[in-house]
């Protein structure tokens, strides 16, 4: 078959468009599913859907001959079906299949069927997209390096494009926009034969795309999300909503909203608030009816007021300020300066501008300084000293049931606490409030982190620096740079008496004092607190091993503050509670583990077994599996490590993720382009693997130091440094895939789709595996595993003929 | 007259008569017999008594009340399961054990007046109504208010007064109350409810997500002194390995 050059060019353009669309779709779907359900469900559904990559390899393997024979026909059909399935995705999942509610998954068996149907709906676009890319790779295998370059650059730009769309459009509309792109790609490849058929298909696709653009239904959120519950209240309504990569921000107004977290039982006034902010359907905070003229603040009647009752503070730092409740509370105590750190710039902009009147313009007061950064990054770059540093309230009311278990939290690590402690003035205080959860987890972990910090900072008698009090629902810790004085202790006791609170940690305190007003039927909470106190922060073995949850302090290497589940204790917890309730206690990590097993089983059953059963001709399947599996795992592990580390470096989740994805993929693309010049001899390929392994080893020893020591530099210098860190590794990691495909095309062409499928599967599995390894063993182990994965790839080359 | 000749097949006649009679009797029996009675008995025995709730009036009430009438029709099969059941609007009918425990913990007695905040399905109100003199219950979501009022009316609970309002303010007109049961978790304890609690009265509030009530809070008022007790965890003893 002779194909004109212009056709080749059109194929290249289509490949580029498909590559852009696949990554954009992935980013947008995670956003949509996080809004409708929760992040961990988005994570699960998308992970399974991405198996479309692996399945495409199986599909091409099984029908290779026919697909290549009718390449000109099947390629545009596959690309158009990618667009069509993307355009109809929301409609199918929302209206045809029926409403799936992830919260009912472990309660209602019919939800499992809906989940499977959703898997299929989300799987289809990725399957068709990956089939299109795979077909092009196989058909033009001699030009694999250039095609892989186009694919990677397209994917890199797709990441940026997806994020850009989230800034300007509502998430569901974005699906329609993305669906147009592959349809155009398919249209470009209209074959001379069957032109009518393809034209009809294109026409239908355009109609569906337009219909999805103009007739999209609203997002059908789980009725158990905070915003859904709020909207059930009479006369409540959404008064503002806007999409951004930080999430889908909504403001709801209702006459029935109130805000008084764990308020003192002595308080007898009203505490209604008019508006509440939600991000991705989750509560982030209220808009308080507080003005600078008000004498009192609602938080003065909660345990949060503790540091203000001990002394006045001239300079205050508020971390993750959200809707500014802590800011107005701080201002009510007339400090000289307040520094506010909030990563969500959209939120602060809204509070400062659109809601200026309702916030009494507190964001524009001259002594209020705002920083839109991750709080940890601010702490790392800050040189100023503060009298009071306020952490955000930990956990949600009644516990978060592990909803945030797989979200990294670099603010609550020992390293972070040490930096915060060093940012205190001589008589300064740190304060942190948490909901008291049952069984106790977060509150005990906070204490463990505080004590580990003081212990590692070589503070003598840490107990003399800490105090904690509790109401019926909250516990507030204060940590003083110097020792607490007897006058401080007296003021704490006085405050407790006035508000009907009880001290939990206080020098010379009696056990009876702890339960004067708010008692607990079980002593477990106090036992854990006392055992942590006796162990200088490190959870004593007697508690750490015996307790059913992880409550030890977290580190930058394992920054999962909200992850308390011990995998080894699942069986025990099941016996203790019952299997039906465990998911509601520690959901997040359980979902990750569940996802891992699902994709492993699905990979074997749907992808690897069919390939083995149909007995693809040719030797070297195991070697292909090891090689492409190794480089698939290694690549994803490195990508995840870079995303994590640069989040801290740049202090902005969105930009750091976009930066890493783009730079890594584009530099790999350049590497792939360069790969065409590499001779397919063992020595050359071994050198490439050698370079990758050496660079990963350097990363293991240098990356963290480099990030912590240069974080305070100018942003542009940081960008250049990051380019120098990411792109060399990206460049070399872009070479092994196309060179091996080229080698296979010479030695055993039949194995190419198998290689494509294996690479797709292992890439998905490794994303989930990275989370599990990071939670269990830390990021350094993930990085080392990447090294091992590439070592396996190199060994395959070494042992080849 | 050949009387005998009119009935050629006496045995057959007897057989059919017996068959018809037994069908009629079993039909009447099945109409009067409650098919969920056994389920309720098992619920009380295995889900409630076995976990340490022995308050007789509560157990009797839960043996009597047709819980399946308080859940959506498509979830009747789950009505007596050991767990909460979704009733729409992000709400659930609480797990039977939680209902029993919350009832027992306020020490309800015959001549008492109890306020419930968050009628939901109406089941908790029905249980209370079987024990105390009068139950006042408030539901903020109109749809739930309507459906629960209807069920309670259908079951003939004349000592239950349902109101569609914001429970935060309580029901001052009928205050003070001997006991208050708050069935919807809130991150504050409404001051008006504390005011409307009788001296010596007890209020119970759940804390936790809708599907997993992890703990209950007991608020007691003794003159000016207000104390709370966290009855945690509701369902189990503190757990450590080996306990």
Image (spheres, coloured by chain):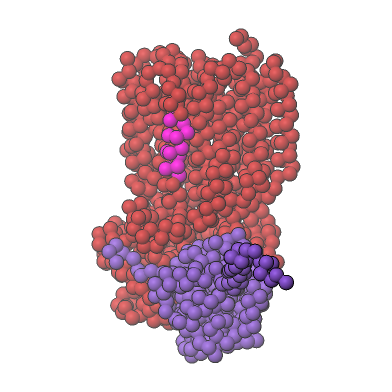
Q: Which residue shows up at 62% across the image and 31% down it?
A: A82
Q: Residue at x 64, y 11 (%)?
A: A4
**A100 up-or-down from A311: above or below:** above
Q: Is residue A127 left or right of residue A598?
A: right
- Residue range highlighted in magenta: A595-609
Rendered shade, chain A: red
Q: Position of residue A412 (x, y in %)?
A: 41, 56
Q: Residue B24: percent from the left, percent from the top?
A: 62, 69
Q: Nearer the viewer, residue B228 or A165?
A: B228
- Up the image or down, A795 lies above or below A458; here it is above
Q: Quadrant of residue A439?
A: bottom left
From the image, give the main secondary structure of the stretch colored magenta.
Answer: helix
Q: Position of residue A683 (x, y in %)?
A: 33, 16
**Furthest residue in direction front, as rendered:** B1
Q: Which chain is purple?
A: B
Q: Is residue B100 magenta?
A: no
Q: Is residue B229 visible?
A: yes
């Amino acid at each position: 078959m002779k194909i004109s050059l212009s056709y080749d060019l059109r194929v290249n353009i289509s490949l580029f468009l498909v590559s852009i669309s696949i990554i954009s779709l992935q980013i947008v779907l995670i956003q949509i599913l996080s809004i409708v359900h929760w992040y961990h469900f988005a994570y699960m559904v998308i992970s399974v859907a991405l198996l479309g990559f692996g399945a495409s390899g199986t599909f091409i393997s099984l029908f290779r001959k026919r697909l290549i024979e009718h390449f000109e026909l099947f390629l545009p059909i596959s690309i158009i079906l990618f667009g069509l399935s993307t355009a109809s995705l929301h409609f199918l999942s929302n209206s045809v299949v029926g409403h799936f509610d992830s919260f009912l998954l472990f309660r209602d068996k019919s939800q499992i069927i809906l989940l499977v149907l959703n898997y299929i709906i989300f799987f289809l676009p990725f399957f068709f997209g990956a089939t299109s890319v795979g077909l092009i790779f196989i058909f033009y295998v001699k030009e694999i390096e250039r095609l892989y370059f186009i694919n990677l650059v397209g994917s890199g730009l797709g990441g940026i494009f997806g994020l850009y769309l989230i800034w300007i459009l509502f998430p569901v509309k974005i699906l329609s926009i993305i669906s147009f792109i592959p349809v155009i790609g398919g249209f470009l490849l209209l074959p001379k034969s069957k032109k009518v058929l393809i034209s009809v298909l294109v026409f239908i696709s355009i109609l569906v795309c337009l219909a999805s653009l103009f007739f999209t239904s609203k997002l059908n959120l789980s009725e158990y999300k905070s915003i859904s519950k709020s909207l059930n209240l009479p006369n409540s309504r959404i008064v503002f909503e806007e999409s951004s990569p930080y999430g889908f921000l909504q403001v709801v107004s209702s006459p029935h909203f109130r805000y008084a977290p764990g308020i003192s039982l002595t308080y007898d006034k009203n505490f209604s608030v008019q508006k509440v902010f939600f991000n991705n359907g989750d509560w982030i905070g209220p808009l308080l009816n507080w003005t600078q003229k008000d004498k009192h603040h609602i938080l003065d009647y909660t345990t949060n007021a503790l540091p203000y009752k001990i002394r006045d503070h001239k300079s205050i730092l508020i971390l993750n300020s959200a809707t500014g409740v802590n800011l107005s509370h701080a201002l009510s105590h007339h400090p000289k300066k307040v520094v506010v750190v909030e990563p969500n710039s959209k939120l602060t902009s809204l509070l400062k501008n659109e809601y200026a009147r309702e916030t009494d313009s507190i964001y524009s007061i001259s002594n209020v300084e705002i920083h839109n950064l991750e709080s940890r990054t601010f702490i790392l770059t800050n040189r100023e000293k503060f009298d009071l540093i306020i952490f955000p309230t930990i956990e949600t009311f009644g516990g978060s049931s592990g909803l945030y278990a797989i979200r990294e939290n670099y603010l609550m690590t020992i390293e972070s606490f040490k930096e915060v402690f060093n940012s205190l003035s001589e008589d300064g205080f740190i304060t942190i409030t948490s909901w008291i959860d049952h069984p106790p987890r977060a509150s005990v972990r906070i204490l463990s982190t505080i004590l580990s910090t003081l212990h590692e900072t070589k503070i003598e008698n840490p107990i003399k620096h800490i105090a904690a009090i509790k109401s019926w629902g909250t516990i507030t810790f204060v940590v003083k740079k110097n020792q607490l004085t007897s006058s401080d202790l007296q003021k704490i006791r006085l405050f407790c008496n006035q508000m009907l609170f009880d001290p939990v940690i206080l020098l010379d305190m009696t056990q009876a004092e702890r339960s004067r007003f708010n008692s607990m039927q079980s002593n477990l909470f106090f036992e854990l607190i006392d055992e942590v106190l006796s162990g200088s922060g490190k959870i004593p073995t007697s508690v750490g091993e015996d307790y059913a949850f992880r409550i030890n302090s977290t580190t930058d290497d394992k920054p999962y503050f909200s992850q308390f589940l011990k995998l080894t204790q699942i069986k025990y917890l099941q016996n203790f509670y019952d299997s039906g309730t465990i998911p509601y206690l520690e959901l997040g990590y359980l979902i990750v583990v569940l996802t891992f097993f699902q994709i492993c089983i699905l990979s074997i059953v749907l992808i690897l077994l069919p390939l083995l059963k149909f007995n693809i001709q040719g030797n070297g399947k195991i070697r292909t599996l090891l090689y492409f599996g190794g480089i698939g795992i290694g690549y994803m592990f490195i990508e995840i490590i870079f995303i994590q580390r640069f989040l801290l470096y740049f202090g902005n989740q969105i930009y750091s993720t976009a930066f890493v994805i783009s730079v890594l993929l584009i530099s790999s693309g350049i590497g792939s382009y360069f790969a065409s010049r590499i001779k397919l001899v063992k020595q050359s390929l071994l050198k490439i693997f050698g370079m990758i392994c050496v660079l990963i080893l350097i990363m293991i020893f240098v990356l963290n130091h480099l990030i912590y020591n240069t974080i305070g530099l100018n942003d542009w210098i940081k960008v250049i440094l990051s380019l120098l860190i990411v792109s060399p590794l990206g460049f070399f990691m872009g070479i092994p895939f196309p060179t091996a495909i080229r080698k296979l095309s010479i030695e055993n062409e039949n194995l190419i789709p198998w290689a494509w499928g294996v690479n797709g599967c292992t890439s998905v599995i490794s994303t989930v595996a990275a989370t599990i390894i990071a939670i269990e063993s830390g990021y350094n182990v993930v990085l080392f595993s990447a090294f091992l994965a590439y070592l396996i790839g190199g060994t395959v080359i070494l042992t080849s003929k | 007259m050949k009387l005998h000749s009119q009935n050629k097949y006496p045995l057959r006649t007897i057989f059919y008569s017996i068959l018809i009679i037994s069908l009629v009797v079993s039909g009447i029996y099945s109409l009067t017999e409650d098919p969920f009675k056994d389920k309720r008995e098992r619920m009380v025995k295995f889900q409630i008594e076995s976990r340490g709730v022995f308050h007789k009036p509560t157990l009797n009430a839960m043996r009597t009340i047709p819980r399946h009438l308080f859940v959506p029709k498509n979830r009747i099969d789950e009505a007596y399961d050991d767990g909460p059941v979704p009733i729409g609007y992000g709400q659930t009918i609480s797990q039977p054990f939680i209902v029993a425990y919350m009832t027992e913990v306020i020490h309800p007695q015959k001549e008492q007046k109890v306020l419930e905040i968050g009628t939901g399905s109406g089941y908790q109100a029905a249980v209370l109504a079987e024990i105390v003199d009068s139950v006042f219950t408030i539901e903020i979501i109109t749809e739930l208010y309507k459906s629960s009022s209807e069920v309670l009316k259908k079951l003939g609970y004349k000592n239950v007064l349902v109101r569609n309002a914001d429970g935060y303010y309580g029901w001052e007109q009928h205050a003070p109350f001997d006991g208050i049961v708050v069935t919807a978790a809130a991150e504050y304890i409404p001051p008006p409810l504390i005011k409307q609690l009788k001296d010596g009265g007890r209020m119970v509030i759940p804390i936790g997500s809708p599907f997993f009530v992890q703990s209950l809070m007991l608020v007691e008022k003794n003159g000016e002194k207000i104390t709370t007790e966290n009855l945690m965890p509701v369902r189990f003893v503190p757990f450590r390995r080996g306990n």
